[in-house]
Amino acid sequence: MKLVLVRHGRPDEDDAERPHDPPLRADGWAQARAVARHLAAEGITHVVASPLHRAQQTALPLAEALSLPVITIDGWAEADRSTSRYRSTETLRALDPASWQRFVADPVRYLGSDPDRFRADVLGALQQTLALGDTASHVVVFAHGLPINLVLSHALGLPRITHFHPGYGSITRLRVRAAGVVGVVSINESGHHERPPAPPPPTVRPGAAGGNRP
């Protein structure tokens, strides 16, 4: 089985109606559409998503393009699912050094979840996802930074959960053998996103210092 893990697009941290589970920002929707364009021709057979709003919305363009349902699996949710307000890692880093260090030391507990329960939930979601198809299936999961980290750490035999920083709308590819062994193909692909245009070169007036010379 080919398994693709996609981190959700950038959410709106300032959303007043759903501060605990915000929708995507405009650039988050652009990231979701870029993922859909990139994966639409790859023979995707199943689209899976975390129950959280930002993951569901990121899954929508691909599901619509392929006329596939979004299969919701609860265990793919982020560790912050019970917090009163979503905060990105960029925001957490900017709060204060002590808070950031607490997050780095134990991100799951910092976000209000139990590490053992979180690990069991994510690995359970992985098994539920693998049970959806067979060795010929190509499954995309729209999830979050910590679940993606946990699956990668599990596949690589790493003791800690966090070793990587998946970007918004990034793609991580895995290959699952018949025995259930998970191999890592790529981590944090982001080349499918549009890059802002480069600024034009400075205008140099003839005769000015560094300008054209005869």
Image (cartoon, grey):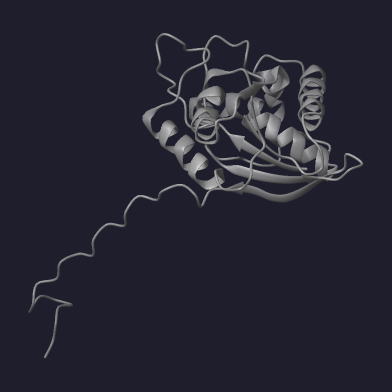
As drawn, 203 above or below 139: below
As drawn, 73 above or below 32: above
Q: Residue at x 47, y 12 (%)?
A: 19
Which residue in the rendered view is the most extreme toward the right? 179
Q: Closest to the observer: 106 or 200?
A: 200
x then y, percent, for residue 50 = 64, 22
As drawn, 120 above or below 28: above
x then y, percent, for residue 83 = 59, 11
Quarter holding the C terminus is bottom left
Which residue in the rendered view is the most extreme toward the front? 67
Please indicate, yes or no, whether residue 78 appears anywhere in the rendered image.
Answer: no
Which residue in the rendered view is the most extreme toward the bottom? 214
Q: Quadrant of residue 154?
A: top right
Q: Residue at x 51, y 39 (%)?
A: 36
x then y, percent, for residue 191 = 51, 52
Q: Quadrant of residue 33?
A: top left
Quarter holding the N terminus is top right
Please indicate, yes or no, whether residue 192 appears anywhere in the rendered image.
Answer: yes
Report the side of 44 relative to 15 (left or right).
right
x then y, percent, for residue 45 = 67, 37
Q: Residue at x 69, y 24 (%)?
A: 76
Report the side of 184 relative to 80 (left or right).
right
Report the side of 97 relative to 153 (left or right).
left
Q: How many marks?
A: 0
